[in-house]
Image (tube, rainbow, N blue to C red):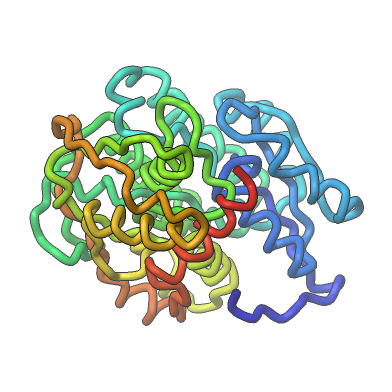
Amino acid sequence: MWAIRLKETMNAKKILVTGGAGFIGSNLTEELLKRGDHVTVLDNFSTGKIENLLPLIGSYPSTFKLVVGDIRQLDDCRKAVDGIEYVFHEAALGSVPRSIKDPITSNEVNVSGFLNMLVASRDASVRRFIYAASSSTYGDSKSLPKVESVIGKPLSPYAITKYVNELYADVFAKTYGIETIGLRYFNVFGRRQDPNGAYAAVIPLFVKKLMKLEPITINGDGEYSRDFTYIDNVIQMNICAMDTENPQAVNQVYNTAYGERTTLNQLIATLKEYLGEYDSRIPHVEVIHGPKRAGDIPHSLANIDKAKKMLGYVPQFSMKAGLKEAVKWYWENL
């Protein structure tokens, strides 16, 4: 991973990570603790796992704190932000299909919970509020690559909630003076991403199927494409957003990606190649094509020039380099 200078204790930041027991949140929490920062995690474990935090609890007893609570409860949010300088808001209910099946709960968590966190952060005089936005905000826009200033209409309840987050953050920055930075994540993958459950992300789901020598089902012809983004790039981007002292860089949204497009067919071919190094039977696993999935964006590719210019973001892992690391982790841990 890219080199980050370890902080002296006197310069340690006081940080809250909501959803810190989840995939992205736990990886971010771990890196912040390694830097020497003091980190509080707020999580209700609805999708996050205590197993993701147990090593941190044992390794950083004086700089790690866990608050079990729900962002839908304002009192929980207020408790978590007490004494905090920087908030990383990662808590959310992900998944387009889940939001289509249950839009009410997605809205309660992703919109009402987000607003609770903004209010609590404002009242606690938090310096900067960095939040997980989403590439789903680009909606039906057909322009490629995706540039932050050009979006279309949302294609799912999930996409609506993430766009509303951006609108609320902008209003709070202008009205109350809290610094906000939104990071539009593009198909993040890597260690600790859960392959189980009805709404598992595509890469860990495919890896699990391949390792079990079970057929893979692709929605559509496999030519839909995504800007798959390795977790370490995302951590780097979050820390760039926290550390920046450029006044022009705050109260903005940024694409968080590598800037490379991969089709699902290409993804599966690469997964078979890498996993085939562990089991020669895997490249022969059958691929089945099913119907297209409602709410899916056909193609996604990020322009990351703004993040490079404003935040000094230089992603270190291409999709293939990240996939190599992820496959190794899954082989050793599944």
Q: Going by the picture, which residue comes out furthest to the right?
A: 62
Is 109 displayed left or right of 259 in the figure?
Answer: right
Of the pair 78 and 32, the residue shown nearer to us: 32
Residue 65 lies in quadrant: top right
In the image, residue 221 above or below residue 46: below
Residue 4 lies in quadrant: bottom right
Q: Quadrant of the N terminus?
A: bottom right
Where is residue 103 shown, x and y percent of the image?
33, 21
Evaluate whether residue 1 shows in this view. yes
Where is residue 248 shown, x and y percent of the image?
41, 75
Is 140 displayed left or right of 87 in the figure?
Answer: left
Q: Residue at x 32, y 49 (%)?
A: 284
Is 26 displayed left or right of 90 in the figure?
Answer: right
Evaluate whether residue 252 shows in this view. no
Where is residue 262 shown, x and y percent of the image?
25, 61
Of the pair 117 and 56, the residue shown nearer to us: 56
Q: Going by the picture, which residue comes out furthest to the left?
A: 142
Q: Residue at x 31, y 18 (%)?
A: 101
Where is residue 292 shown, x and y percent of the image?
15, 34
Of the pair 226 and 129, the residue shown nearer to us: 226
Residue 127 lies in quadrant: bottom right
Q: Quadrant of the C terminus?
A: top right
Q: For the image shown, how many numbered marks are present on the structure?
A: 0
Q: Going by the picture, which residue comes out furthest to the front?
A: 280
Of the pair 329 and 143, the residue shown nearer to us: 329
Q: Residue at x 43, y 58 (%)?
A: 276
Q: Residue at x 40, y 50 (%)?
A: 282
